[in-house]
Image (cartoon, helix red, strand yellow):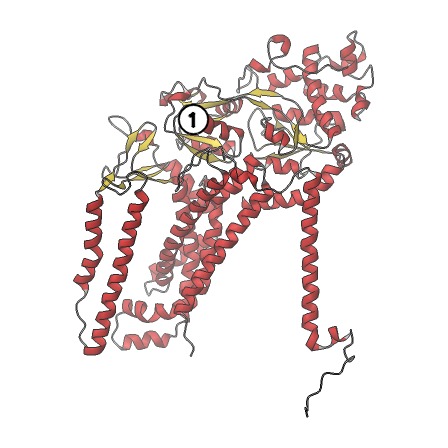
Amino acid sequence: MSTLSDPQQGSFRLSMLLNDTRYRSATLQVIAAIILAACLFYLYSNLAENLREAGLNIAFDFLGAPAGYDINQTLIDYNSQSSNLRAAMVGILNTLLVAFLACITATVFGVIAGVLRLSNNWLVRKLMAVYVEIFRNIPVLIWIIIIFTIMTAVMPAPSAFRGDDPDSTMLFDLFAFTNRGVYIPGPYFTRGIGGEDGSWINWLLVIATMVAALFGTRAVTARAEAKQAATGVRPNTLWINLAIWFVPIIILLTILGLAWDIPALSGFNFGGGLKIGGPLIALWFALSIYTGAFIAENVRAGILAVSKGQTEAASALGLRPRRVMSLVVLPQALRVIIPPLISQYLNITKNSSLAIAVGYADITATLGGITLNQTGRAIECVLLLMAFYLIISLLISAGMNVYNNAVKLKER
Amino acid sequence: MKKSYILGALTVVGLSASAAAAATLDDVKSRGKLNCGVTTGLVGFAAPDANGEWKGFDVAVCRAVAAAVLGDPNAVEFVPTTGKTRFTALASGEIDMLARNTTWTFSRDNDLKFEFTGINYYDGQGFMVPKALGVSSAKDLDGATVCIQTGTTTELNLADYFRKNNISYEPVPIETNAEAQQQYLAGACDVYTTDASGLAATRATFENPGEHILLPEIVSKEPLGPLVRHGDNEWGDIVRWTLNALITAEELGVSSANVAEMASGTNNPEVARLLGTEGELGSMLGLDADWAKRAIETQGNYGEIFAKNIGEETPIGLARGLNAQWTDGGLLYSPPFR
């Protein structure tokens, strides 16, 4: 015999949907969902109707058609006969390149400025405060344009390097700083696998060797720690680690026949070597110093969040200030620093779309700029751009959250 | 920049229904102002002068249409557009017509659904280089860095030309003519390429125009003309025939100086039809009889507009060339007013 009985049938009244706390939240959510769906449907039907009246349609066929224009910085093979999709890929890689570089340098600038802003030295402290306040409070677009304008106006044109008595000379005969960019010696392999076409295989080999070396040294360090834990004596790993780092890579580079391509004047520009274009430098540098100022504040907040007792305790153990910072304070501060750091990385990635101001061929300039204009497919291009930035932002966010989980306080 | 595309796309979404369905003529009349898209500034074609008043060859077309439709050549709201924003502005209804150095191409006419209402300047793409570079032909430009306004037909022609001649170049994409000028003068690019008329206009503003030369090669056909949205034929006709009226006026010897006199009495029936003293041409357009007279009176005929803004007497110094009347060996040929 059961003591439980079914809920009374018929006791449910319609007004309970609003009055009864058991149902109210669900009711409101259903209403909100219906309103949202109605709004989306209205926008979509409006778009569809307007496009139909204008005789247009949404189609992505244009992605396969030849782009017809040239791009000044391409990390993959591209020419004007390549498809619009290929041009978009070039743009995506350029966006990722500048975002990656700027994230690294912004972090370096930010950590240095953030730590120094808490320095006991009055001058250093104030200088860093000035840096943070100036760069944080002027829009990044202005910084990009300022840096680019200064570069084009101040640096010499390649023609200044010509002649018997040129106005400008190359630094160490290796580097040329021009208003079109910086030319540096470029590495190549004389005995590389696969010749010209296979050059990326060679670089893959180099990277693989370095990754292997990283794991090698980590294994050596782990063994040394295990031995220290067991015996109290830590074996000297310095020479082993140096050997793991350098011997394999030197052997590999010798086998492949590493050589350097020195930039030299040819025709209108410098030829040979690697060119780091002016737009890339301006964008990279501007994003770095601008976002660096924000990261500096994150770092300062993180450090201030660590209890002063931690510093005092570490000092009492006899650690020098530098080691107190790197061994005690920063590891704890990371827990506070990383969540806002994620959004700074997202900001860098999104702000890289300002590249168009200096003619850097990122995804906004190729797909969302030239392709959009040449094909007139505004809606399709903007949709694709939105999808790209959304996906990239979610990926960065996900990756950084994994790291955040690794360093955050483990609550057991 | 990104924001403007999204807003642009949204305005396409929001506005094009009303714009495509309603008659632009009624909109313009009820607003009392013509919204005319022009360049962000190209001296001689469209640029504000020291008093902030828009002047130029393309501006005159806008003013002529405003004079014909609204009776006031100053009832124009000039909307500066870049190579990138111009089509969105027109498609979304932000502007009623676009009178800008815009090339009539197949895909713009058919794929983008615009209607070109004629050609007010026959142009072609050229190259400008500093004299000091010692280049005398575009074929010598192998490896050069080229400043180019992005989103234009010149961008595509440039790629085609260098590809065809099997020489390489490095493009520097630039948004506006002013930026291009700055980059070019700073030596950040060896060559500036755009329509030859635009090059001449840009060079005229340089401190030392003599230090720069236009290379002899003209690598493309660039028929420039005003355009309107597809689907509003009445409005398209008004813009088309206002331009034709200016061209016909020159051919028939009607100028701003003698238009009043000719309107009071002439023995040339085509002039009489043009100026509305004979026939019903104005009402066929949905305008009054004096529409063409007002346009010619306030702006002058095509030849006057050319001479005043970009002709050989101006700093821009363009010869009539292809833009002479068909009777003088040029390409200007308006259908008859009959």
Residue A47, percent from left and from top? 67, 46
Residue A63 lies, in percent from the top left, at 53, 40
Image quadrant where one finds the C terminus of chain B: top right
Is residue A29 in view? yes
Above-or-below relation of B17 to A27 = above
Q: Position of residue B13 (x, y in %)?
A: 66, 45
Relative to A222, is B48 above or below? above
Classify A252 as above or below A332: above
- State the quadrant of the N terminus of chain B: top right
| Location of residue A168 by image quarter | top left
Which quarter of the figure has residue A50? Answer: top right
Q: Amino acid at mark 1?
A: Phe
Q: Residues within 10 Å of mark 1 (few under 14, many from 20)?
A: some
Q: Secondary structure at mark 1?
A: helix
Q: Can residue B320 be seen from the camera position used here?
A: no
What x and y, as percent, mark residue A24? 70, 73
What residue do we see at 37% from left, 20% from top? Answer: B135
Task: Identify the residue at horizontal 47%, vertical 40% (top origin).
Answer: A87
Work out which residue is located at the far bottom of the displayed protein and give it.
A1
Q: Residue at x 32, y 45 (%)?
A: A200
- Residue name at image x 21 percent, y 43 percent: A257
- Asked if residue A127 lies left or right of residue B77, the reply is left
Chain letter of the residue beneath label 1 in the structure image: B
Tally of numbered tags: 1
Extreme-front residue of the structure: A1
The residue that mark 1 highlights is: B162
Give the quarter of the image for residue A273: top left
* Residue closest to the eye, B335 or B133: B335
